[in-house]
Amino acid sequence: MTVPALLRRGLLAGLLAGLFAGLFGLAAAEPTIGAAIRLEGEHAHAHTAGGEPAEQEVFSRGVQQFGLVVATTVTGGSLGLLFGLVYAGVYARDRRERPWRQALALAAAGFVGVFLLPFLKYPANPPAVGDPATVNQRTAAWLMAIVLGVLGVGLAWWARRRLAEQGRPEPVQHLAMAAIVVAALAGIWLLPANTDPIEVPAHLLWQFRLLSVATQLVLWGGLGAVFGLLGERALRPAPADGVA
């Protein structure tokens, strides 16, 4: 497959996966997000100085919900383009495995490196959590965690391939991968902690975080599955002329 063809495949897979994730988030996480937003509104109203009216929301909840689906779809498409590009560099010339297995393996690596490892240090918080004054600091730390996570997963993949080329047994390969991922997690753990107070009920906080993990699983799982299915379809022989 050519790189443009893989990019088109990644874009389509990413758009569909982003749509799936957005609809899942809308159906499963919306009650939790709505509760967090109501709590944030009550908190802001309670702290309004001098009885001044609280700020009105710019967009209605319906618009925000529609924007959630659109945002996840667009994000999925962008992620799919990167997925196709990485796939082209990693697997395009590797014919030892089917596209289905390759796509799922790459999606699993992306989930771990881009989301799971950073999440262990900086778990997702609902809208009611976070000081606006620290948003730049928190964003920079989160991006650095993603960089370290991706580097760790990439080095683990490279080490496994090198050890496989040297004929090392699979337990050695897997232990080396695990050691590199643990080292990446240790590096992430050394990043500055998020010290913003969390003033939402514990059950609401953990529901939101679990639903965040589930939404990411839908996104990455959908991306890998759709990309793999499209790859399997591309391997089918074209029908002969005159054959329906």
Image: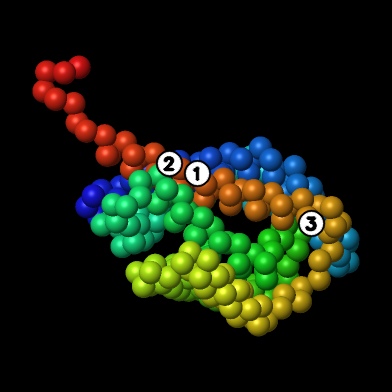
The 10 Å Cα crowd at callout 2, few under 14, some 14 to 19, many 20 or more, is many
Quarter of the C terminus within the rendering: top left
**Disc 1, SS:** helix
Could you tell me if residue 175 is visible in this image?
yes
**Compared to 241, does 81 lie above or below?**
below
Measured as percent of width and height from the top left, residue 135 is found at 65, 72
Between discs 1 and 3, the one toward the N terminus: 3
Dot in front, 2 or 3: 2
> Where does label 3 land, which residue?
205
**Tag 2: residue type?**
Val
**Disc 2, SS:** helix
**Tag 1: residue type?**
Gly
Measured as percent of width and height from the top left, residue 32 is found at 75, 47
Q: Mark 2 and mark 3: span between their CA atoms?
A: 31 Å
Specify the label residue 68 is tagged with.
none
* Of residues 125 and 151, the one drawn nearer to the viewer in this rendering: 151
Dot in front, 1 or 3: 1
For residue 74, side relative to residue 216 (left or right): left
Measured as percent of width and height from the top left, residue 117 is found at 60, 67
> Where does label 2 land, which residue?
226
* Of residues 129 and 160, the one drawn nearer to the viewer in this rendering: 160
**Compared to 72, does 118 lie above or below?**
below
The 10 Å Cα crowd at callout 1, few under 14, some 14 to 19, many 20 or more, is many
Between discs 2 and 3, the one toward the N terminus: 3
* Of residues 93 and 200, the one drawn nearer to the viewer in this rendering: 93
For image coordinates 61% across by 48% down, the residue present is: 215
**Disc 3, SS:** helix
Tag 2 near tag 1, CB within 8 Å: yes
Q: Quadrant of residue 121?
A: bottom right
> Where does label 1 land, which residue?
222
**Tag 3: residue type?**
Leu
